[in-house]
Image (cartoon, helix red, strand yellow):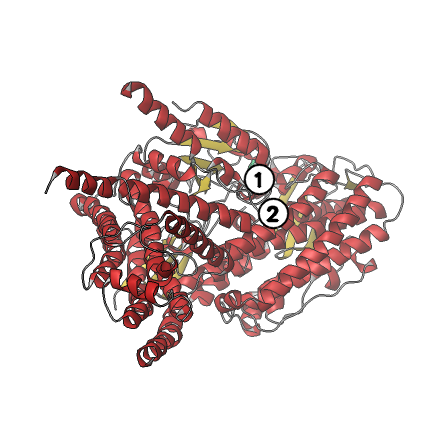
């Protein structure tokens, strides 16, 4: 019986308390301010238990915006390494999915997935806050 | 006393964009700071040379998400100047309307960020709640909350209908009440004052030496505003005041920005009352005759400056963008000197950096 | 010791008013805090199970520390602070249960409640991150100002009752009147001291997000972080109960059910006050805080105590 209950409790806890770490990897700010709007009264994601944490060690989900510039890449890698398991990566915005409008520029790598394994892509330039919430919810639905 | 060096950024809750400060501390006191930029450098100026003039309108909007409209306005103005296009009055008015709405949204956003940085989360929430009114209106008009894609070369893409106008009137009335309330709260709140007064002081000489523009300059007593000094679009047909303060600290910048927000609301009301009839755009040719041009506009953070050179093809030969953040950035090490570590957050938030603009 | 006694003791340690009751109260108050702040800010706030989910999740997360950290101390520090808060709770007659009381347990309680702040400071040094060290240093700087304030303001009750024993403080209140009325000033200053202890706004300088990320806890993750959080939550309950005991416990007789209800109500009301203060004030700067405490609050408290003595 123990064997069945513990994973269930863990799964429940992980689904109910996703803490985000936001990192701008070279985006235009558009998606970043939409992520910040998530915290504010209109969207208030705290009702789903989502908190925006500031230390990588406390976070569960790394939420990245931007096409990954050359200079930001080592830092992105490092932040990911600092996060404790289990962790997920969310690419928010078209430019963090594929490079988007910036593809072809000399200084960008084109998408978070060039550097990190991405668990969920959210398209939109900029993404609507609803889309971001939906992305997080879908991501959590897959949590085992 | 031994010094320790604290890195602030590139990932730091204080900044929503990557920027790196190395602050060396003696106890809690900042002795020195160095700045490292370029984390958001995407090479947009070079990229613009590979795309056509029309594609560039949408690329230029992505220089910065907060002031996207002002960038595309300045860009379109410069292309129109090269083409010698006469944009219809109604088009210009709608452009201005969005510029001013964007100013309101940007200033409220900034106020929230400052409040968050000094630990006043409630004000952050209130400011951002009121900002949603503007976002709603902009979404109704253009279809986008943050990036609007309203400008096209030769005018604007959307027209205002009665529904928009009534929504605007209602929203602006509500905003006036809310913003005035915020102004009262800030002026009287002791803890806000304690954390922002005499912090990040810049004298008028410093402002002139570093060529600072925008609200930061106006809060130190430098009276510049492109909208009044070199009117673009149709600003010469509207009447507005340019608020001015002389204290030159973070507190003055806060009050000044809120006063500007109130002015922007007034401007919006004027625009919808004086909205001329007629078309909103004229069609523009794809090829732009060769020549060079300079275009300026007043962004929420100060003057933006575009230089455009054309060689007669469909793509620009050179596009140079200068944003207000660049000038404020270099004043930061001076402002931070001898401050407490706790004030670093207030100072950095106070000048309203937009790294995405600065790095491009 | 006969069997009945042992069972009773175990019951007291683990169920009521021991660990289990404390845990529930801590989680509930934490939820209440977040919910109230959210409501003040015009938001909806988290559901009731949120603190539990957070803790369970943290306990199940990977536990990593930067290389070069002394693992033994990193594990020991949160344990010590957790244990000290738990121990404190046994001396304190939480709700109606009478705890073993002796002369001077007031001071012991003070000491136990101040241990976590010291551990917090050490935690900053152990993990060696820049932000952790600064956060730790700040907590130590702040420590002296609010601890002194808390001790002085609370000792007003001891002076008035003429004894350093918690039981006597309560008896004296039952005989006369609850100390909240004659000592309202002392109560308010004790609340300020408690806010400092709990590192809440406007005394949240050591963990100011926009300055030092998460202070001394920046590098902690997983179980240890959970333990730190739990410590702070328990500290809230114990600290508030301490306040209630010293200022309000004259309101009910020994071991009555209604007394328990009053106790819980007071707990909720005080938590509401803490939340409202958090929502209203901006964070102070360290020099402002030290100035405020040493030049205004502490002299006033001293005057207040002298006044109580003379009375
Ligand atoms: S997706 Fe678009 S709006 Fe979002 S950061 Fe990238 S360019 Fe900006």
Residue C306 shows in this picture = yes
Q: Residue at x 70, y 60 (%)?
A: B262
Q: Is residue C194 above or below residue C159?
A: above
Q: Quadrant of the N terminus of chain B?
A: bottom left
Drawn side of residue C127 relative to residue B132, left or right: left
Secondary element type, mark 1: loop
Mark 1 burial class by Cα count in 10 Å: few <14, some 14-19, many 20+: some
Mark 2 burial class by Cα count in 10 Å: few <14, some 14-19, many 20+: many
What residue did someone put label 2 on? B66
Drawn side of residue B342 relative to residue C65, left or right: right
Mark 1 belongs to chain: A
- Distance, label 2 to label 1, CA atoms, is 19 Å
Q: Which residue occupies the foreground of this view, B235 or C104?
A: C104
Secondary element type, mark 2: loop
Q: Which residue occupies the foreground of this view, A55 or C78?
A: C78
- Residue furthest out toward the bottom: C310
Where is residue C310 shown, x and y percent of the image?
A: 32, 81
Residue B353 shows in this picture = no
Q: Which residue occupies the foreground of this view, A29 or A45?
A: A45
Where is residue C165 shown, x and y percent of the image?
A: 23, 63
Ligand 1 within 8 Å, label 1 CB: no
What residue did someone put label 1 on? A43
Drawn side of residue C291 relative to residue B126, left or right: left
Quarter of the render that holds ligand 1:
top right
Mark 2 belongs to chain: B
């Amino acid at each position: 019986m123990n064997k069945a209950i513990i994973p269930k409790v863990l799964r429940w806890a992980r689904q109910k308390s996703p803490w985000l770490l936001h990192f701008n990897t070279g985006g235009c700010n558009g998606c970043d301010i939409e992520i910040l709007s998530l915290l504010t009264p209109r969207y208030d994601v705290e009702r789903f238990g989502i908190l925006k944490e500031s230390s990588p060690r406390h976070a569960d989900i790394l939420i990245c915006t931007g096409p990954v510039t050359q200079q930001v890449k080592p830092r992105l890698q490092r932040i990911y390494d600092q996060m404790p398991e289990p962790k997920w990566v969310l690419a928010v915005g078209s430019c963090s999915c594929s490079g988007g409008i910036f593809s072809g520029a000399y200084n960008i790598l084109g998408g978070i997935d060039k550097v990190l394994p991405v668990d969920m892509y959210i398209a939109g330039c900029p993404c609507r806050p609803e889309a971001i919430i939906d992305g997080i919810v879908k991501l959590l639905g897959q949590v085992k | 006393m031994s010094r320790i060096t604290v890195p602030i950024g590139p990932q730091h809750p204080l900044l929503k964009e990557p920027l790196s400060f190395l602050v060396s501390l003696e106890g809690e006191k900042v002795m020195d700071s160095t700045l490292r930029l370029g984390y958001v450098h995407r090479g947009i100026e070079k990229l613009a040379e590979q795309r056509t003039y029309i594609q560039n309108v949408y690329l230029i909007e992505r220089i910065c998400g907060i002031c996207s409209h002002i960038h595309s306005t300045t860009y379109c103005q410069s292309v129109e100047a090269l083409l010698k296009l006469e944009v219809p009055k109604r088009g210009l008015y709608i452009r201005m309307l969005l510029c001013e709405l964007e100013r309101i949204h940007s200033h409220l956003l900034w106020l929230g960020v400052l409040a968050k940085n000094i630990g006043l989360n409630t004000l952050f929430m209130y400011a951002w709640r009121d900002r949603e009114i503007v976002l709603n209106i902009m979404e109704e008009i253009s279809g986008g909350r943050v990036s609007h894609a309203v400008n096209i070369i030769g005018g604007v893409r959307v027209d205002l209908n009665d529904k928009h106008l009534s929504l605007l009137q209602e929203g602006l009335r509500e905003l006036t009440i809310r913003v005035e309330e915020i102004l009262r709260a800030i002026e009287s709140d002791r803890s806000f004052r304690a954390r922002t007064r005499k912090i990040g002081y810049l004298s008028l000489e410093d402002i002139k030496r570093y060529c600072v523009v925008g609200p930061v300059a106006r809060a130190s007593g430098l009276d510049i505003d492109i909208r009044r000094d070199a009117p673009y679009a149709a600003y010469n047909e509207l009447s507005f005041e340019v608020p001015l303060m002389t204290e030159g600290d973070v507190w003055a910048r806060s009050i000044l920005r809120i006063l500007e927000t109130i002015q922007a609301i007034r401007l919006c009301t004027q625009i919808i009352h004086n909205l001329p009839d007629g078309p909103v755009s004229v069609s523009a040719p794809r090829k732009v005759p060769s020549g060079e041009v300079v275009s300026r506009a007043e962004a929420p953070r100060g003057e933006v400056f575009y230089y455009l050179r054309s060689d007669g093809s469909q793509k620009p030969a050179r596009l140079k963008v200068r944003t207000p953040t660049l000038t404020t950035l270099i004043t930061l090490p001076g402002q931070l000197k001898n401050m407490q570590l706790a004030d670093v957050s207030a100072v950095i938030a106070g000048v309203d950096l937009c790294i995405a603009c600065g790095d491009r | 010791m006969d069997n009945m006694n042992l069972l009773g003791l175990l019951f007291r340690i683990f169920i009521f008013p021991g660990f289990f009751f404390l845990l529930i109260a801590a989680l509930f108050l934490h939820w209440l805090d977040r919910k109230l702040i959210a409501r003040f800010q015009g938001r909806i706030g988290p559901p009731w199970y949120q603190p539990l989910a957070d803790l369970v999740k943290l306990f199940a997360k990977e536990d990593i520390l930067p290389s070069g950290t002394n693992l033994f101390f990193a594990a020991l520090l949160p344990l010590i602070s957790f244990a000290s808060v738990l121990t404190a709770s046994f001396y304190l007659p939480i709700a109606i249960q009478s705890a073993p009381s002796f002369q001077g347990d007031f001071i012991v309680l003070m000491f136990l409640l101040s241990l976590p702040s010291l551990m917090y400071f050490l935690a900053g040094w152990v993990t060696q991150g820049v932000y952790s060290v600064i956060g730790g240093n700040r907590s130590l700087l702040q420590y002296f100002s609010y601890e002194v304030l808390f001790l002085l303001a609370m000792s007003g009750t001891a002076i008035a009752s003429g004894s350093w024993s918690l039981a006597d403080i309560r008896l004296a209140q039952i005989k006369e009147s609850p100390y909240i009325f004659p000592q309202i000033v002392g109560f308010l200053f004790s609340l300020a001291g408690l806010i400092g202890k709990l590192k809440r706004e406007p005394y949240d300088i050591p963990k100011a997000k926009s300055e030092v990320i998460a202070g001394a806890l920046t590098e902690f993750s997983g179980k240890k972080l959970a333990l730190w959080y739990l410590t702070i939550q328990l500290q809230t309950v114990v600290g508030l109960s301490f306040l209630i005991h010293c200022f309000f416990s004259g309101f009910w007789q020994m071991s009555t059910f209604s007394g328990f209800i009053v106790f819980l109500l007071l707990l909720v009301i005080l938590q509401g006050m803490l939340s409202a203060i958090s929502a209203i004030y901006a964070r102070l700067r360290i020099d402002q805080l030290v100035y405020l405490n040493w030049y205004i609050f502490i002299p006033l408290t001293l005057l207040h105590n002298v006044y109580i003595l003379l009375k």
